[in-house]
Image: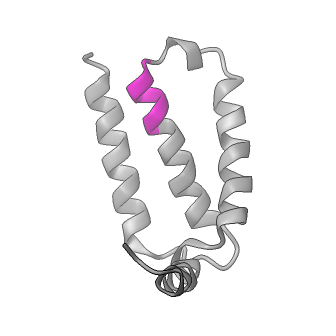
Amino acid sequence: MPEANDLTITFKQRSSTHGTFAENGRIAMQMRELFRSTGNWQALNPAQQLALDEIALKLARILSAGADPHFKEHFHDLQGYSKLAEDACDV
């Protein structure tokens, strides 16, 4: 299990690529509220809803001040969650 100091180092490293947790939360929660206010949110199955929530977080990481918007992993993750949502269409 990592020690508190290890977590501090991880948080500092991630903030340069992911932005701050607080900023990510603000952006992602605004998107999630928008998603839930639409006419089709309830028509989605839980896997699709979860994929969209994760996509909101990935988009927040791209858009967050202080984040690296060119960090390829963000876009790779978006593809992955989109594929999971696509696969859930057949469920």
Residue 87, given in percent of the width and then of the height, sits at 25, 29
Between residue 21 and residue 2, name the one nearer to us.
Answer: 2
Name the residue located 67 percent from the left edge and 42 percent from the top edge. Answer: 31
Q: Is residue 5 above or below residue 33?
A: below
Q: Is residue 40 above or below residue 74?
A: above
Residue 58, given in percent of the width and then of the height, sits at 51, 56
Q: Is residue 4 above or below residue 24?
A: below
Q: How is the image coloured?
A: one colour
Name the residue located 39 percent from the left edge and 28 percent from the top edge. Answer: 47
Name the residue located 72 percent from the left edge and 64 percent from the top edge. Answer: 23
Q: Is residue 68 left or right of residue 76?
A: right
Quarter of the picture containing the N terminus is: bottom left
Residue 16, given in percent of the width and then of the height, sits at 56, 83
Residue 85, given in percent of the width and then of the height, sits at 35, 32
Q: Is residue 50 magenta?
A: yes
Quarter of the picture containing the C terminus is: top left
Q: Main secondary structure of the magenta part?
A: helix
- Read off the magenta span: 45-51
Q: Is residue 63 above or below residue 38?
A: below
Q: Is residue 49 magenta?
A: yes
Number of numbered discs overlaid on the protein picture: 0
